[in-house]
Amino acid sequence: MVRGSSGSGDQFKMMVQAAKPTLFNTTARPELITCVLMANLMSEPLWSLAHRIGKPITGASPEADRARVLAKIHKFTNSRFYHATPLELAGIWGLHEREYIIDRDDLEASDYAMKIIAWAYELLKEKRPWGPMLLEFLKMGLFPEFVYPTVDVILAHGPRLSNQPNRPLGMTSCADECILIASLALVLRCCSLDDIVFLCSPFHYTLFLFPEGSDGFWFNAKREYFDSRGWARLNEGCSRAARAEAFMSRMVVFDRLITPRGSWIYHKEESNLKPERIDFLLSKIGRFLGIELKELSPTIGKGLPRQIEPLEDEVLPAMDECESSGAVATQIRALVEKNCAPVVASSLYTFRHLEVPEPGVYVSAALSGYKVWLRSAEVLSVSDAVALVQDISGRESVFGASDRIALPDEVLVFNTASDNERVLLLYTLLMLSSSFSTSEKEDFVINQNDGPWSATCSGRPFFGWDL
């Protein structure tokens, strides 16, 4: 039982998924990528990273300054972050398992993502040593769990990478890298939110930035960075077909545009971007690359997309004006008060703020954790669960001394937890354990109302300081 939650339905489900964005739930809800972007902007460590790179450019800065700062962002992310392999991510976050999915929409998204990923790995299996193994995983309905965290969790991996060359600051996937680069570009005033375009698929993410007055910039995650002249030089004298091949050798497959204003997934013919906006973005990307995107994906342009709920016009300019993480957080809360689009409210859950209308979201997200599910097999009694929580050596959240909450999987990976996180871990272990009957679990209660969280188990209350 969860005290402090009353949510249900699709909006509650979106907030749960926003609390833990993954490769598979962002397949169905690409707006979760925007949630991570907004959550990053609320995070002080992001602004600290940006200040290590340089000073924000000003309106009076020449265009060359923008290109120079973006090149520094690329160099910084490429040299200071470790790109994890799928098998390394499986070791950290576990596996996505198709057989345990009961929601029809989630199952459809899982099957679609696995189909695209399998197709891509069939093409690349000779170039990626782990490709054949992942193809066997996919045949069994399994794939490494790619979690798309905020910059705080990315950086928390840093101490675990001390044996790597250059002592990386953190660990990333290609989606993490694109979101991080976009976040840093925003803080350093290289672009506005409306200039950001992710061209991607469940297999691979890339990022385009189209600041006003520029011809654009392309980040192939952290591997490569091109301005329009650099891409043109690379393909100088090449035919249109050769340019397309150079592009697709990097992309392999793409099926969606994601922007802070909305997204478009080609095969679904559904979008919260207006058709004219989609055409504008496709033409901008096409001019940058010197190719026609519609020639590369047969599903582009097959009828107009059906428009779903758009993002209000006031949201992006309001956030562009912010000059600190605190200002972003304040602006997002003000927009939530105005009942702006769900993506804005959901970003608070991606940020993991404790002061949210539905703290029960974090319980639902916790119960979907793979690592904590495995550890729940060790729990035969309440005392077993208590002992497991007490074995967590760190007493501070991975988010530091802040009003934020880490999920149990993060607690287990990083071996540190605040008092509230210990209560959440205890409750999750008990609810996932197969040693208790349904009626016994109905007597387990987590209280997330005002003040410190607590859990009541077999009539005994537990606070974080007890654990």
Image (tube, rainbow, N blue to C red):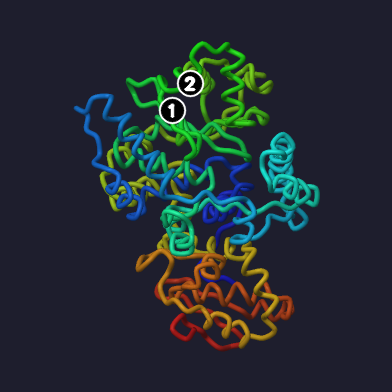
What residue type is disc 2 on? Answer: Leu
Image side of residue 286 versus residue 382, left or right: left
Using the image as rendered, state which of residue 80 and residue 254 is in the foreground.
80
Q: Are marks 2 and 1 in contact (CB under 8 Å)?
A: yes
Residue 153: x and y, percent? 46, 58
Task: Identify the element where label 1 is drawn.
Answer: strand
Using the image as rendered, state which of residue 147 and residue 337 is in the foreground.
147
Which numbered circle lies on residue 234?
Answer: 2
**Residue 251 image-quadrant placement:** top right
Residue 262 visible at all:
no
Image side of residue 186 versus residue 461, left or right: left
In the image, what residue occupies the spot 52% across and 35% down?
206
Image side of residue 129 versus residue 39, left or right: right
Task: Say which residue label 1 marks.
Answer: 226
What residue type is disc 1 on? Answer: Phe
In the image, what residue occupies the spot 66% across and 53% down?
144
Numbered disc total: 2
